Image (cartoon, grey):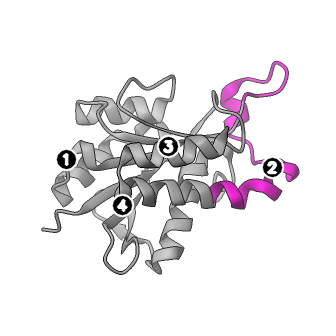
Amino acid sequence: MDTNQWLVVGLGNPGPDYASNRHNVGQMVLAELADRARAPFKSHKTNSMVAEGRTGLEGPRLILAKPNSFMNLSGGPVAALLRFYKIEPERLIVVHDELDIPFDRLKIKKGGGAGGHNGVRDIISAIGTGDFVRVRVGVGRPPGRQASADFVLRDFGSAERAVLPNILTDAADAVESIARDGLTAAQLRFHTVAE
């Protein structure tokens, strides 16, 4: 077993109707990571799509996973992936959208509650701990009185789409930095850039 490995889960909803939604930004980041590693996603028995690669030639091994379940039921596949790969929760990185962070920013944290995010809540419930790393990709608050649920299930606007590739690159860089350099170094690097 490779002891220098991380499970990286990108949250989202399955299927082409949701692929470009704000709620699926976690899975967009995983697509960027898989492209970098030249690792195709394949169907896995944990009800997930999985790609495996390294951060550089000798870097940590990343197991990239996109649950096939809907966002609010992400916990079952994540728990199954941790068991299958024999990975402890402290080596789990969950990439997800975050309403409380402005669009084009990201924050990294370890532990804590779900912060109102139902996908994260289901993972905490399924694995019995919140002691894992989260890369929280800001999508901002909905305009006016639009409901948050409607907002995250809409595609990014045209102005946002122009900037989105940069955000996906930054978030993928953050995941690689966490695995390679450690949580504190990644936070120092990416939280400073975001200010």
Q: Which residue is mark 1?
A: 88
- In three-dimensional space, the C-alpha distance between marks 4 and 3, rounded to whole angstroms, equals 14 Å
Q: Secondary structure at mark 4?
A: helix
Residue reaching furthest left?
1
User: Mark 3 or mark 4, which is nearer the start of the sequence?
Assistant: 4
User: Mark 3 or mark 1, which is nearer the start of the sequence?
Assistant: 1
Q: Which residue is mark 2?
A: 160
- Would residue 101 appear left or right of 180 to someone viewing this image? right
Which-is-in-front pick, marks 1 and 3? Answer: 3
Q: Which mark is residue 180?
A: 4
Say which quadrant the C terminus sits in: top right
Say which quadrant the N terminus sits in: bottom left
The x, y position of residue 149, in whole percent, is 66, 29
- Would residue 116 appear left or right of 194 to someone viewing this image? left
Mark 2 residue type: Glu
* Camera-nearest residue between 171 and 157: 171
Q: Secondary structure at mark 2?
A: helix
